[in-house]
Amino acid sequence: MDTTGLAYLSIAEASALVAKRAVSPTELTDAVIARAEALDDNLHAYLTRTFATAREEAKTATEEIATGAYRGSLHGIPFAIKDIYETAGVETTAGSKLQTPNIPTADAHAISLLKQAGAVMLGKLNLHEWAMGGTNVNYFFPTPKNPWDQTRITGGSSGGSGLALAAGFCYGSLGTDTRGSIRMPASICGITGLKPTYGRVSIRGIIPLVWSLDHAGPMARSAEDCALILNAIAGYDPEDPTSVDVPVDDYTASLGGPSPSLDGMRIGVPREFFFDVSEVDADILKAVEEAIDVLRNLGAEVRDIDFPDPVYHQDNQLFGAESAAYHEERLRERPEELSTLPRERVATGAAVSGMDYARARWRQLEFKQRVATTFRDVDLILTPTVPVPPMKIADIEPAGPGRIMARHTAPFNILHVPTISVPCGVTSEGLPIGLQMAGRWWEEGLVLRAAHAYQQATDWHRRRPPL
């Protein structure tokens, strides 16, 4: 197999070859590093490369596996990590000039779990400054380019992760998602991204954006790969106050095998907001309708449903006030080192009153209660992930198009429910389109099963950008 073929293996495929010693971690690591070294000076996925260390880790993994000390599906698999996760001995910038130099002394909890599973760490990936945006158009670091059209955005804030996976620079990544920051770049870059239930994956050691909305989760090329990663990183962390002690499933067992059926699964489609023809691109609507037909053919019962008004319930006061609380000292002492969008957002958040914040929290509780009622009648809720194709980098204004980009993703952060984006088509210009599916709290397995079944019946997730 040539280098490109190796670099575009799924984690499931690569780990099967590693387990039977048909391919070594060293070969996998060399393949993705070769692509990054050839292409990334132009694309800008990485902020920090730790390729020399990765080669040493891959050599160690190869030796361990050769002696029979195989740890499981992630052993020897090369990962790159959004640069908002703290990494011991490796700079963590959060995409900000203010954060440098910052060399953590300990790993974020999720990173330590990946390392325990034997993953190889390639480096730190680009993100929107402080994770405060959905475009990944940056001011202090190079803006990452969409590999499907390099004049366009990758989406954010986990844009470097979406780019790196689509370009074949790694096999898996960890992103964070506060208003859609895993799912937006997944949709725009043509990869798969899962936001688990709030509290399912520890956020300890991740630089915060909004404590009550921050989710950590896997990004990969398939739902199956996301399940493999989630198996490694899910679980209770007693040192994280947001972590919840609930049983963790075997997410790969939940997938239903190579030919899964969706017989009996009830999927609800909220058309009034998420399918508004005045807000959602026609190519995206067409692709999602075709995906609905695929799910029906797999046995799912798909029907239209009512849905609470997302605009009323996802008040941005909640978002802004918590960001301002975290960044208060920076805004006071070094405001010139925040670019326009973060500075404005933090200043606006600082002006939020306690009463406004309390009302936003109450609306969040109302929203969750009303959607819990909806979930009595359906198992999943289906929408387009992003309502518009990725914009051109040159057209992005300083304030950024955050509201339209996160229009469909942010409600599910307020709800805290597990939500996935999978590729489901391309626009007339050949740009990826994402399908979003959300499930009940703690039912990641059901979400992954539906996504996996869809991907077994289609090949959108296997398509590669023209690099």
Image (spheres, rainbow, N blue to C red):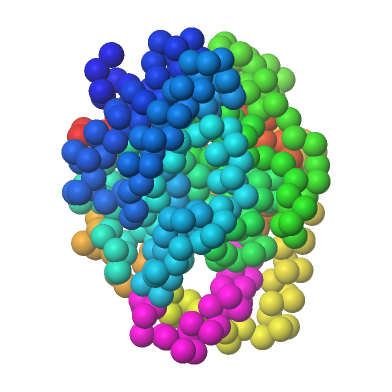
Q: Residue at x 66, y 50 (%)?
A: 202
Residue 418 placement (x, y as % from top left): 65, 43
Q: Depth check: give the residue in front, 427 or 214.
A: 214
Q: Residue 132, percent across and down?
A: 46, 66
Frontmost residue, 72 versus 315: 72
* Total count of labels: 0
Query: Is residue 208 at least partly visible in the picture?
Result: yes
Q: Residues in magenta?
A: 311-340
Which x, y percent locates residue 244? 78, 50
Residue 114 falls left or right of residue 11: right
Residue 276 appears in the picture as rendered? no
Residue 248 shown left or right of residue 7 in the figure: right
Q: Quadrant of the C terminus?
A: top left
> In the displayed structure, would residue 231 be above or below residue 102?
above
Res. 359 image quadrant: bottom right
Q: Judge by depth and name the residue closer to the eye, 271 or 462.
A: 462
The residue sitting at 75% across, 60% down in the picture is 241
Residue drawn 62% across the image and 83% down it: 352
Foreground: 381 or 32? 32
For residue 80, what is the image quadrant? top left
Relative to 463, is 369 above or below?
Answer: below
Note whether 322 is above or below 10 in the view shown: below
Secondary structure mostly seen in magenta is helix
Q: Residue at x 66, y 28 (%)?
A: 251
Would you say 373 lies left or right of 386 here? right
Image coordinates for residue 206, horizontal then vertical, percent? 56, 58
Q: State the quadrant of the N terminus.
A: top left
Would you say residue 323 sits in the magenta stretch? yes
Residue 331 magenta-highlighted: yes
